Amino acid sequence: MNPSLTPRRRLLAPLLAALAMFGPFSIDTIFPAFPAIEAELRTSPFAMQQTISVYMIAYALMSLLHGPFSDALGRRRVILAGVAVFVLASIGCALSGTIEVLLAFRALQGMSAGAGLIVGRAIIRDCFDGIEAQRLMSTVSMIFGVAPAVAPIVGGWVVAFARWPMIFWMLSAFALALWFACLALLPETHPPEHRLALSVNELGKTYRMILRDRAFLPLALAGSLNFNALWVYISSAPAVVLNLLKLDSQQFAWLFVPAISGMMIGAFVSGRLAGRLNAAATVRLGYVIMLGAAVLNVFVAVMLPEPRVPWSVLPIGLNAIGIGINFPTLTLLLLDRFPRHRGAVASVQAFVSLVISAVMAGAISPLLSGSMLALAIGALASTAIGFGTWRMYRAIEGREMQLAAAAARQ
């Protein structure tokens, strides 16, 4: 732990959570505006779905650079630059007159939005170790969870009283306020003497080292696939809320509040378990909850051919509790495998997760969003495969421990 930063922990948690929030906020806020944007820009539902996938793909590609840039240039500088670009991109979205222009600025939003989330994870690990790191990661996750719950509600009320560009003007104002907060309050946690050279060759070496680590991909996939059991519903939110549940644009809370409340409860539980359960036991508890909730979700979908609230959304919230318990622990396990390259590890982790999420939003969700049963089966499959990759990691970890013990005896 960096002792000089300990008094700033209370400031770091809300600030890092806010930095992580504006990325998902910019995804979820526009869901209630889909019909209005589609009508005004004279485009199709498929093209509107691409406002999510284009954002996610750009986010994923740029995420490969946010972390290494912060390893070489410092955390604070990269975050300030990313937030500034996001402000300009949001203004561009607000002024868009065609779907093509909107998609271009959505891509620019995605390229910049990941700086706060990705570099923020490295900041946590720069400042804190062990139990303290897990507690702060859980606190940030808990605060961060407010964004996806509040965002579609805010978007719904904005659309009710103003035109859809007001959503992007609000995003730009929020990001600008956050930029000034970072300028005043965000410390530099990665001093010059710890920085790495920034070059294409060094970047390639770092990524090869990370990807050659046998435990990296199973851990990264476990976290990503867990979340995508929830993301399949979030990315299908307009279809789920408006078509399947037959609610209106001011009632997105029926889907988002249970889902995000579950993640917040899980993150809170994860923080409370720090120091009481080891990493393996914490993740095992998360999977018991997730797999049980996923099976219950399929059962409810079968029993209710006509989906209705609250029964059709409660298993989604229960599944989210398990996701919230597991995510901080899985992230710290990844970061701790590469202490000198935390920014790069956070970047590659985000890239893997975002590519999977982009494929889910752009290709899989449209295929599943016609029925709650198809969505429930998709969520169960994602959770089950994630559990399988976690078991792969545990087998690799066991072999590593045996080799280390044998080497110590020699």
Image: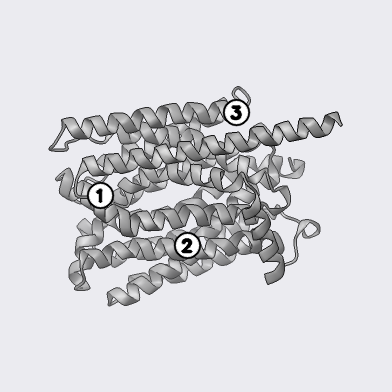
- Give how far apart the Cα atoms at labels 2 and 1 are: 24 Å
In the structure shown, which secondary structural element does the residue marked by tag 1 occupy? helix
For the residue carrying disc 1, how many other residues have a C-alpha within 10 Å: few (<14), some (14-19), or many (20+)? Answer: many
Camera-side residue of 402 and 188 = 402
- Give how far apart the Cα atoms at labels 2 and 3 are: 31 Å
For the residue carrying disc 3, how many other residues have a C-alpha within 10 Å: few (<14), some (14-19), or many (20+)? Answer: some
Numbered badge on residue 277: none
Q: What residue sits right under mark 2 in the picture?
A: 59
In the structure shown, which secondary structural element does the residue marked by tag 3 occupy? loop
In the structure shown, which secondary structural element does the residue marked by tag 2 occupy? helix
> Which of the image's four quarters has the C terminus?
top right
User: Which residue does the image show at 66% across and 51% down from the upper left?
Assistant: 342
Is residue 222 in sight in this rendering? yes
**Residue sticking out furthest to the top:** 276
Camera-side residue of 28 and 284 = 284
N-terminal label among 1 and 3: 3
Q: What residue sits right under mark 3 in the picture?
A: 274
Q: What residue sits right under mark 1 in the picture?
A: 368
N-terminal label among 2 and 3: 2
Q: Are marks 2 and 3 in contact (CB under 8 Å)?
A: no
For the residue carrying disc 2, how many other residues have a C-alpha within 10 Å: few (<14), some (14-19), or many (20+)? Answer: many
What colouring does the structure picture have?
one colour
- Give how far apart the Cα atoms at labels 1 and 3 are: 37 Å
Q: In the rendering, at what x and y percent does residue 40 appear?
A: 20, 71
> Which of the image's four quarters has the N terminus?
top right
